[in-house]
Image: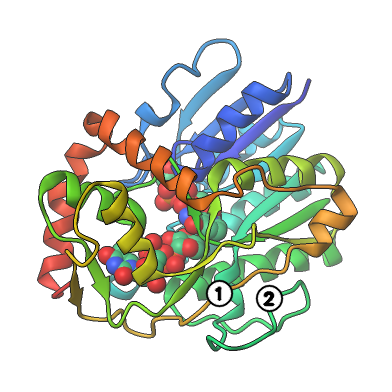
Amino acid sequence: MRNLVVTGGAGFIGSNFVRHVIENTDDHVTVLDKLTYAGNRASLEGLSGSRVDLVEGDIADAEVVDALVSEADAIVHFAAESHNDNSLHDPRPFLDTNIIGTYTLLEAARRHGTRFHHISTDEVYGDLELDDPQRFTESTPYNPSSPYSSTKAGSDLLVRAWVRSFGVPATISNCSNNYGPYQHVEKFIPRQITNVIRGIRPKLYGTGENVRDWIHAEDHSSAVLAILDGGAIGETYLIGADGEKDNKSVVELILDLMGQPSDAYDHVVDRAGHDLRYAIDSSKLRSELGWAPKFQDFEAGLADTVRWYRDNESWWAGSKDGVEAFYSAKGQ
Ligand code: NAD
Ligand code: TDX
């Protein structure tokens, strides 16, 4: 039984990970979360009690961080400002949390010799052409496009430096686009599902030819646990489930699953600097740690996700109007 500190555990992937840990290990979890607009206590409902504690605090607050890390066997670091569109509007919080926050955690891990797993994204590698036969691997050069992805790239490089220079026992994972329950309605899939529920037409940026490599958040969680348990210190692992889909096909599938005509969506203003395609080669994780995804059927996983948003309107209703106002002011 370990005591895990999970940063960002009240967010989308973090809360799915906490649930996965509780169901699959004997570990105790202390969530450290600032409860920004993206964090939600309700995402941890049913998990409190003897196995999970929630501490409301900032990962950039050295005092709070040190007190928790001094008691921890391992840190799993999900907390971040995570939305590209927000980073184009106001980059500053991305520097504060993704760079200074990660630095603050690394310094605590260094002082206490604590195992550290850093959660990152495939966006650090930039984008691929639609017809490029290569996918991202652990040796693809970094080439981030947005304020979000550049701060994630910076945080990855800090982790690598703290491993090499200070011997912090850390691993890194870079995962592709996640879907599933508890994802904020600002993100692509929940935005379109909740639009349809509200009678608003889905909004596709630009032509919709952009490709994302989708993985269910439950599969991301099982991969992170596998790396925490068996990953080699200093190594990076790419996490992906061979789920490439263009955005237009995803919108059409959502409309279809929700009983609407598949062309009942609008093309809107494109995202500045919009990455064209992400694609992950996760052979290293699969061959070295024996990991495999369970959600191979994207349509079935998406149907479950649609059902979750229909059944949990009270979880997202409070954020929906503000998010749509933010987008419509930009013609999106
Ligand atoms: P999210 O925005 O849903 O959740 C982020 C959580 O971090 C929230 O609970 C928020 O309150 C918390 N947080 C933000 N700033 C904080 C701070 N300063 N101190 C403490 N807590 C803070 O994000 P997500 O989509 O769950 O992403 C989680 C991690 O996974 C991020 O590091 C992200 O870069 C990475 N990632 C996400 C995806 C994806 O598809 N969503 C894919 C690959 C990697
Ligand atoms: O309304 C929309 N219409 C649309 O066409 C929105 C919100 C997005 N899009 C497009 C932009 C992207 O091509 O859909 C795609 C997915 O968009 P997001 O959900 O914003 O995700 P993305 O920018 O790909 O980044 C996500 O995956 C990598 C996460 O938000 C990041 O945290 C993660 O690192």
Residue beneath disc 1: 278
- Compared across the picture, whether 228 is left or right of 31 comes to right
Q: Amino acid at mark 1?
A: Tyr
| x and y percentages locating residue 83 in the rendered image | 38, 62
* Figure quadrant of residue 137: bottom right
Mark 2: secondary structure: loop
Type of amino acid under label 2: Phe
Left or right of 79, for residue 324: left
Q: Is residue 330 above or below residue 43?
A: below
Give the camera-side residue of 325 and 130. 130
Residue 124 location, x and y as percent?
59, 74
Residue visible at 77% across and 55% down in the picture? 171
Counting from the top left corner in percent of width and height, residue 30 is at 59, 28
Residue 69 drawn at (x, y percent):
67, 36
Name the residue: 76% across, 25% down: 2
User: According to the image, label 2 marks what residue?
Assistant: 136
CB atoms at circles 2 and 1 under 8 Å apart?
yes
Mark 1 CB within 8 Å of ligand 2: yes
The image quadrant where one finds the N terminus is top right
